[in-house]
Amino acid sequence: MIPELGYGAAIVALGLALWGALAAALGARTGRPALVLSAQHAALGVFALVTACLALLMYAFLTFDFSVRYVATNTNLGTPFYYRITGVWGALEGSIILWTWMLALYTLIVILRHRESARELYPWVLTVMLGVLAFFLLVITVAAPPFARLHPVPADGHGLNPLLEDTGMITHPVALYLGFTGLTVPFAFAMAALITGRVGDAWLTMTRRWTIVAWYFLSLGLLIGGWWSYHVLGWGGYWAWDPVENAAFMPWLTATAFLHSVMIQERRRMLQLWNLALVIMTFGLTLFGTFLTRSGVIASVHAFTQGTIGAFFLGFLTLVLLTALGLLAWRWDALGAQGALDSVVSRESAFLLNNVMLVAAAFTVFFGTVFPLLSEALRGVKVSVGAPFFNQVNVPLFLGLIFLMGVGPLIAWRRASVDNLRRNFLGPVLTGVAAAAFFFALGVHSALAVLTLALTVFVAATIALDFARATRVRARMGEPLLPAMGGLLRRHNRRYGGFVVHLGVLIIAVGVTGSQAWSVQTETTLGRGESTELAGYRVRFEDLAASEESNHFKVAGAFTVSDGRVLGVLRPAKKFYPQEQSPIAYVDYRLGLREDIYLVLGDFARDGSRATVKLQVNRLVSWIWIGGLVLTAGAGLAILPETKRTA
Amino acid sequence: MSRRAWRWLIPLAALPLLALLAYGFRVNPREIPSPLVGRPAPGFALTAFDATPLTLDAQRGRVVVVNFWASWCYPACYEEAPVLERAGARTATGAFS
C-alpha cells in the first residue's frame, strides 16, 4: 500500500508540475494573474507530494519493506539505522527523489522570495523551474521508479554498497545535490530574462545570492567528497579526476567564473551575453553530470547502473541546450556590449582573464572526460585519460588563477595608473619574492612548489594589505581595532566574504602542493612484534583481532605508532561483507597539521602471525580541509544580506 | 535579418556533442581489450608449494593456465580452485594452476 501511495504521489506531482509550467507561461503571455497564481499553487502541491514520496520511501527503508525492489537492493536486516536513512539516496532511483525534493524546495523558496519582487520575470521563472521538475518527476514515474515492487518478496535484502556506509553519505550527496539543484534558479532567471527580453541587470542582481548559495553547497559537496575519498577509499588521495568528480567540478568552475563576471556587468555594463552563456553552460554541465553518473556511458567509480534512464537525460539535455541557446540567438541583437575595455591593465581585464582561465579549465576537464568516447567514436581506439593529463593542463591554469586572485581585487577599474600599481602591488610582490627565496633556502627545490608557495604568499599579502588599510581608515575615525575589523566584514560582506574564500583557496593550494610534493609511503609485511620505519615514525605490528559486526565480519590489526615516544595505536581493518566479492579496507589514521600517518591493512595470515600494511605519511593534507572550512565560511559571509549603509 | 542568420548556428553547435553522447550508449566503457592478448607471456621464476623451483620456461610445450588469486578472495577464488584442479587432472598433458 505504501509503495502505491508513493507512486501515485509522483504521478500527481508530475501532472501538477506540467500544469503549473503551462499555466505560468500562459499567465505571462495573457497577463492573467489567476493563471500564475494557479501555477504557484501547483508548485506548492508538487513540493508537498515530493516530500511525501521521500518520506514514504524512507518509511519503506526503516521498516525493511523488501517488497520494494529499491529497498531490497540497498538495505538488509543488518543495515544500521543511520544507513537505512541514507540508503534512501544510496542508489539511482532514490537519489533522483532527493534531487527532485531539493528542486521543489528551491522552487518554494523562489516563490516566497520573488513573487512580489520580480513581477515580469517571475511567471517565466516558475515555468522553467516547474518544467525542470516535471522532467525529474517523469524520470521517477517512468524511467527509474523507486517504488517498483519485487516478486517474490525476499526474506532479506542485498544491502547497501559498503563504501557508502560512512558519515560522508549523510553530508556529501546532500550538499552536492543542493549545489546542483540550486544552479537551476539562476538558469531559470536567465531564461526568463531571455524570454521577456529584459536582459538587463535585474535578473542578475536577483540571482547573485542564489548562485553564491548553490556555489557554497557545491564547494562543500566537493570538499566532503575529497575527505570521503581520503578516509574511506584507502589510497591516500582526495581527488582522482574520476569522470564523475569532473562532472561536479566543471559546473563549479563555470559558476565561479559567473560569480566574478557578474561584478563586471554590475559595474561596467559589459558581458551581458557572456553572463547568460555562462549560466546556460553551468546548468548544462549539471545535467551533463547527472547524465554521466546515470547513463553508464563513461566508466567511473560513481556510476550507477545502466538503463533507459541515460536516454531520458540525453533527451532533456538536448531540449535544454537547444532551447536555451536558441533563445540566446533570438535575443542576439539586444545583447550588444555596452561598455568597452579601456585598458589591458585594469580590473575588468583581470576579471576577464580570470573568466577565460576558469572556462578554459572547465573545457580541458570536459575534453579529458569525454575524450575516451571521442577516441572510440572517431578512431575506434579505446583510451583512458588519467590524472597526468588533467594535472598537466590544469596546474598552469590554476597557478594563473591564483596570481589573478591577488591582482583582481586591488587593481583599479578602467585603467590602472603606475602609481596605483606601485601602491597596491610593490609590497606584496616583494613579499612573494622574499617567500620564494625563503622556501628555497629552506630546502624546497621543486620549481612548481616554490612558485605555488610564492604566489600564495603574494596573494595573502594583497589581502592583508587591503584589510589593514580598510581597518586603519575605520580605526582613524575613532573605532577600536577589533570592532572595526568585524564591522568591515559585516558591512562589506560580499567583498570580504570573497577575500575569505580566496584565503581558503590559498590554504587548499598549500595543502595540495604539500601532499603532492612531499608525501611518502611504504608497503611491507610484518611478523607480530616487528616494526617498520618511515619518515621518522616507527610502526609496530601488535596483533590481529576478528569481530562480528551487525552486517559484516571485521578483521582489525593493531599497530603501535611512535616517533621516539608512543603516539597511539592505529587499527586499520578489512571488512568482509557477505554481499561483496572482495573485502573493503577500513583505513585508520592520525591527522596532523604538518602530516598525517595513514595505515591500510593489506593481506594477513589467518593465525594472526603476519600482516601486510601500507604506511603513508601524507604531508599538509589537513590544510585542504582547513582551507575548505575557511572557503565555505567566506561563502557563508557573502550570502548574508547586505546591511544598509548608515551615514 | 539574413545578415545575422549565422547566429542560429549557436544552438546547432551543441548537436555534435549531443551526438557524441548518444554514441556513448552503443559502447561499453568497461569492456577494455587487453594489449597483452596474442603476445608471449612474460617469464617468471617462483617456488611451488612443495618447495621446488618453478619457471615458465621449463613448461615449454605444455598447456599452462596461470590463475591469479588471493587468500582473501572469497568465495569466488574458493569456488574456482577445485574446478581448475579438476580441469587440470582431466588434461592428459597436465595443466597446472
Image (spheres, coloured by chain):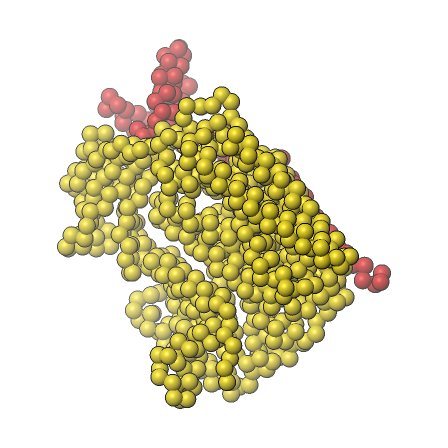
Chain colours: A yellow, B red
| In this picture, residue A361 sits left or right of residue A588 | right
* Residue A251 quadrant: bottom right
Q: Quadrant of residue A358?
A: bottom right
Residue plotted at (42% across, 33% down): A63
Q: Foreground residue, B19 or B65? A: B19
Residue A198 x %, y %: 71, 66
Q: Residue at x 28, y 39 (%)?
A: A573
Residue B75 pos. (x, y %) = 36, 24
Q: Is residue B36 left or right of residue B71?
A: right
Whether A634 is drawn above or below A527: the answer is below
Q: Is residue A85 above or below residue A129?
A: above
Q: Is residue A389 above or below residue A53?
A: below
One can see residue B19 in this view: yes
Please indicate whether residue A244 sits to the left or right of residue A275 in the image.
left
Q: How many marks?
A: 0
Q: Report the residue at 46% width, 39% height from top.
A: A58
Residue nearer the viewer, A198 or A504: A198
Of A2 and A572, nearer the camera is A2
Residue A199 locus on image (x, y percent) = 70, 66
Q: Relative to B66, is A588 on the left or the right?
A: left
Residue A215 against residue A260 in the figure, above or below: above
Residue at the extreme right? B2
Residue appearing at x 59%, y 54% in the figure? A107
Residue A194: image location, x then y, percent: 71, 61
Residue A274 visible in the shown view: no
